Image (cartoon, rainbow, N blue to C red):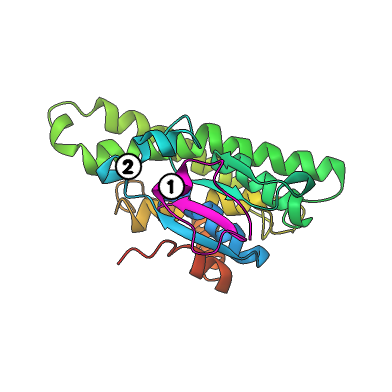
Amino acid sequence: MADLSAFPVSRLFPAQNPDVIQLYSLATPNGVKVSIALEELGLPYEVHKIDISTDIQKHPDFVALNPNGRIPAIVDPDGPDGKPIGLFESGAILIYLAEKTGKLLPKDPALRYETLCWLMWQMGGVGPMFGQFGHFYKYAADKVANNPYPTERYRNETRRLLDILEERLANRQFLVNEEYTIADIAIFPWVRSLTTGYGAAEALNLTDFPKTEAWAKRLSERPAAARGLNVPPRA
């Protein structure tokens, strides 16, 4: 049985099965990226729900794993050289899981870097900009009721990014080389959230992006993705 005592988070969330990957997450667009990848890869894992409304992610035992105090994070008891490893930042975790299994990341060097470009595009653009749009459009609407600038700024940036995605998907099923990769996994939950999370289909005129909407719907219906989208369960 693996010894996870070196990770303080294991005191906060004791592992029932310390021999499998421990996932600390919530079913947000960022969180489900990792659970979808774990499901697609068939890796055994144990999930611990991080209820961010309670600020548990700021507890010192969690911050010891992720200094940024955000989800998701993992502890893999079987890391490099067979030693346990803790990881944070969803993009880094996706790369780690892909390299651990040899799946979801092309082996061809050029295609690998192309995939990483789209992954970084999500991390630096789609996630922050879509998230800010959702914040002002849905969660802080009362605070900006007399100032449309924040919502309009992030609406315009969200649409700009969707334009890029629509063009990329014009004649392809996946983002890179007709191969389902961690880039697809990183991006499609954010596109999906514009409707399912923020209820902003009309505000963003999402019908202007039919290829993107079809792609996100198609990927969300993959059996492994459908499971991962509900980890940890919302109910």
x%, y% of residue 234?
Answer: 33, 63
Residue 117 versus residue 107 in the image, above or below: above
Whether residue 115 is visible here, answered yes or no, is yes
- In this rendering, which labeled residue sits more in front, label 1 or label 2? 1
11 magenta-colored: yes
Q: In the rendered image, which residue does mark 1 sit on?
A: 11
x%, y% of residue 4?
Answer: 57, 49
Indicate the amino acid at tag 2.
Ile
- Magenta range is 1-26
Locate the N terminus and report the quarter of the image it occupies: bottom right
Residue 99 versus residue 37 in the image, above or below: above
Mark found first going from the N terminus, 1 or 2 = 1
Residue at horizontal 38 percent and vertical 65 percent from the top: 233
17 magenta-colored: yes
x%, y% of residue 134?
Answer: 32, 42
Q: In the rendered image, which residue does mark 2 sit on?
A: 56
Indicate the amino acid at tag 1.
Arg
Residue at horizontal 48 percent and vertical 33 percent from the top: 64
* Horizontal side, residue 46 vs residue 101: left or right: left
46 or 135: which is nearer to us?
46
161 or 10: which is nearer to us?
10
Residue at horizontal 50 percent and vertical 64 percent from the top: 228
Residue at horizontal 57 percent and vertical 69 percent from the top: 224
- Image mark count: 2
99 or 154: which is nearer to us?
99
